Image (cartoon, rainbow, N blue to C red):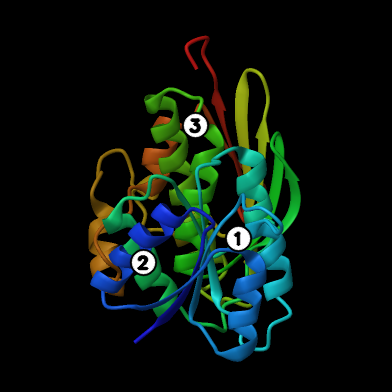
Amino acid sequence: MARILLVDDERVTRRRLQKMLEQGGYEVVPAATGTAALEHLAKEPFDILLVDVWMPGMTGLELLVKVKESPTRPRAVVITADDTPRTLLDAVKREAYEYLTKPVDPEALLSVVERATRGSPSIPPIRVLSAMPQWVELAVPCDRDAAERMQGFMARLDTDLSDDARDAIGRVFREMLLNAVEWGGKLDPHREVRVTYLRAKKMILYRIADPGEGFRMDEIEHAAFANPVDDPMRHAAARDAKGIRPGGFGILMSQSLADELLYNEARNEVVFIKYLSDAD
């Protein structure tokens, strides 16, 4: 049974979250302050640290810094009503595994905790190279779970956009990042994909650079992007022959959703741009 250290200064919230987690089958130890949490950590190990951000005395982000020094360091999940980009990026910088916004949905909470407990402890953390809201730069391990969490983090940076714009950007980013992790990084968690996000008044730009050697068009017969005009489903046979799951439409989908999709010569770096309308 996974053990969770729950840290929140609000008594009602702490009890509600504890009840959710215990009903999910977890052992929960509550703490009202960062100091009390450190005392618990010094006495016994925990699998998960579920921590609020804004608490008196010691904030949750300050607690994450101190927890990094713990010999039995638990995986941290930040939970807060503060969903501003600055707080989000500070949580990522302090190697938070996941970020949940209050009020917390019980199913979302249990899903995140389940993923956090089964994730491999050997996967390196996401590294933050720049944490300005208009210029974010990250190094993401070549691991599917890290990529999925990264997509969730980045989606929270654009909460002011229209639903259509956010959906388009999120789908393209997810596809390009997973391509980089799976094909460029070969799912080796000790290799990294560099992700850069730029937010200007009239556009959002992503640059994704993977550690692979790139590819040539004649090498990706498993992707619909490479199909000849007179044979739009040829890639399906190639995927079947290679034992690859059905699909292969990612690049075509990304081309249709991004306003510009550009590759470097080696094709191990891609830039996509979404121009913002007045409505956005």
Task: Locate the N terminus and report the quarter of the image it occupies.
Answer: bottom left
Query: Which numbered disc, 1 or 2, marks the residue closer to the eye?
Result: 2
Give SS at disc 3: loop
Which mark is first along the chain, 1 or 3?
3
Q: Which residue is mark 1?
A: 214
Give SS at disc 1: loop
State left or right for residue 26 relative to residue 47.
left
Query: Which numbered disc, 2 or 3, marks the residue closer to the eye?
Result: 2
Give 121 or 200, whichever is nearer the viewer: 121
Q: What kind of residue is marked 2?
A: Gln
* Position of residue 10 measured from the top left corner of the image (x, y, whole percent): 49, 53
Q: How many marks?
A: 3
Specify the label residue 18 is tagged with: 2
The answer, for residue 262, to whether it is visible in the render is yes
Q: Is 90 situated above or below 116?
A: above
Which mark is first along the chain, 2 or 1?
2
Q: Which residue is mark 3?
A: 159
Q: What kind of residue is marked 3?
A: Thr
State left or right for residue 195 relative to residue 258.
right
- Kindly report the distance in space between the C-alpha atoms of the residues bearing marks 1 and 2: 48 Å
Give 196 or 264, whichever is nearer the viewer: 196
State left or right for residue 142 relative to residue 209.
left
* Position of residue 85 measured from the top left corner of the image (x, y, whole percent): 62, 39
Q: What kind of residue is marked 1?
A: Gly
